[in-house]
Amino acid sequence: MTVDMDTLHLRLERALTAWVPWQRWYGSKGRPPEGASIVRTTAFGDTLRTGGARGVLLLLRVTFADGGPPEYYQVPVGMRAVLAPELEPYVIAGVDDLFVYEAVGDSALVGALLGLTGASAAPAAPATGSSRPLGVEQTHTSVVVDERYLLKIFRRISTGTNPDVELLRALGSTANPHVTELRGAVEGELDGEPVTYATVQDYLPEATDGFTAACAAAGTGKAPGAGAPRGAFVREARAMGEAVARVHADLARRLGTAPTGAGDIAALRRDLTAGLDAAARRVAALRPLRPAVRAAYERLAALTSGPPVQRVHGDLHLGQLLRSSADWILVDFEGAPGVPLAERRALHSPLSDIAGMLRSFDYAARCAGAPDTGHWTARCADAFCDGYARVSGLDPREHALLLRACVLARAVHEVVYEHDHRPERISLPLAAVAELVRHGHLNSGNQAW
C-alpha cells in the first residue's frame, strides 16, 4: 500500500488540532490550540503492506492564539487499512484509505513500542503478547503488557530528564524496597536538550492503591480484603509514613540536601502567594478565601529555618502508593502535572510530600462519605507522621507552621485541578481550604488535615 506521508501529515495535523484539547492529558485546559504540527516521527513497527499496522510516535508542537509559548505532546499512533472493532474507541481520524488511531489500544504495536525502551528484562517485541491501557486518570498513559510490565508513555514533553527516570535510577542503586525497578526508557533530545518519552517498569498485578484502600476503610470500616476494623488502616498509614521516610532518606543520600534559611522561607512565601493569586484568577470560587490564605502564608515570615530541602516525590498522595504483598510501593515520580520540569527537578522540603499525604487522607474520607471524617483523618495523619518520624527522626508536626502552609497550598492546588478536570468534585478541596483557614492551626482535632 502506497501512502503519501506529506499529505497524511497535513490532514492528520488538522485532525489532531481538534482532537488534542479533548484528551485527559492535555495540559492547557481552557486554551484551545491554534494548531498542532508534527515536528518529529519515530517508526516502531510496520506490517501495513501485509495487512497489519504501521506504528509511529508523533511529537506535536501545539501553538496558541493567545501568543503564549508552544507546548509539545507525544501521540503514538497506529495506521491500518482494516480496523478491528476493539480499536474503534481509539480512532483519531480517517485519512484516505487508512484509519489513524491511538496505538495504546493495539497489542501488536504496544509490543513493538516496548522494544524501543531497551528494557533489560522485558521481551524486545512481544508480537503475540497481550496489553491493556491501565484506564486510570493520569497526565501520562500507562499500558500493562503481559500482566508483567508497565509501559508509561509521557504525553506532555519537556526538555530535561524526566524525574521519574532520574529518581528511579537513583533509588535503584540503593535497592530501596519501596519502588519498582526501572527496566528501560525511551530517551532522546529536543532543541539540543535531553527528553524522556517513555519508561517500562515491573507491574504489580495484585497491588491495591492507597486511595482505594483508604476510601474502603473510611467508608465501611475495612480495608479491601483485610477483613479488619478501621484500626488496621491506621496501621497501614503508619507503614506508609515509614515507606516515604525511607525513600526520602535514600534520595537525600544519593542526590544531596541543602539547608533552609530565612531567605529560602521568604522565597517560599512569595511562591505560595503567587500560586494562590494565579489559582484565584482561574477559579472564581476561591477568591473569597484568598485573603485568609494569604494571611496564613504571611505567618511564615516568623520562621528563620526549616528542614533541609532535597529531591522529593513531588506529587505524593494515596493514589501514588501501591500495597504489594510485602510493603507499600511509591510510584509516579514525575512530579505534579502542570509544574515546569525545572521546578520539579529542584530541591524541595520533604514537608511538601507529607502535606500531600495528609490532604489525601482527608480527601479519601470525604469521597467515602465517612460520618466521622475529621476523627478518622486525624488518626491516619498522626499515624503517618508517627511512622515518618520513627524512621527519619524528623517529626513533621514539630514544623507545624510550615507544614500547615504546605497543606494549604496542596488544597489550593486540588481546587484548580478539580476545576479543570472534575468540576463535580470541586466542593471537596474548597471545603478543606475553608476549614484550614478557619481553624488556623494543625492538630489532631483539626478536620482539615
Image (cartoon, rainbow, N blue to C red):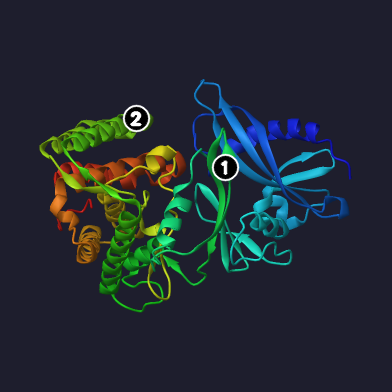
From the viewer's perspective, is 325 left or right of 37? left
Can residue 446 be seen in the rendering of this structure?
Answer: yes
Q: Residues within 10 Å of mark 1 (few under 14, many from 20)?
A: few
Determine which quarter of the picture holds residue 33.
Answer: top right
Check disc 2 and report the residue beneath it.
278
Query: Residue 71: x and y, percent?
Result: 54, 32
Q: Residues within 10 Å of mark 2 (few under 14, many from 20)?
A: few
Identified by mark 1, the residue type is Gln
Q: Nearer the viewer, residue 431 or 392?
A: 392
Q: Secondary structure at mark 1?
A: loop
Check disc 1 and report the residue beneath it.
23
Measuring 40% from the left and 67% from the top, which residue is drawn there?
175
Determine which quarter of the picture holds residue 377.
Answer: bottom left
From the viewer's perspective, is 151 left or right of 433? right
Q: Nearer the viewer, residue 118 or 81?
A: 118
From the viewer's perspective, is 36 left or right of 31? right
Identified by mark 2, the residue type is Ala
Quadrant of the frame with the N terminus: top right
Determine which quarter of the picture holds residue 210.
Answer: bottom left
Pointers 1 and 2 in contact (CB under 8 A)? no
Name above or below for residue 357 compared with residue 227.
Answer: above
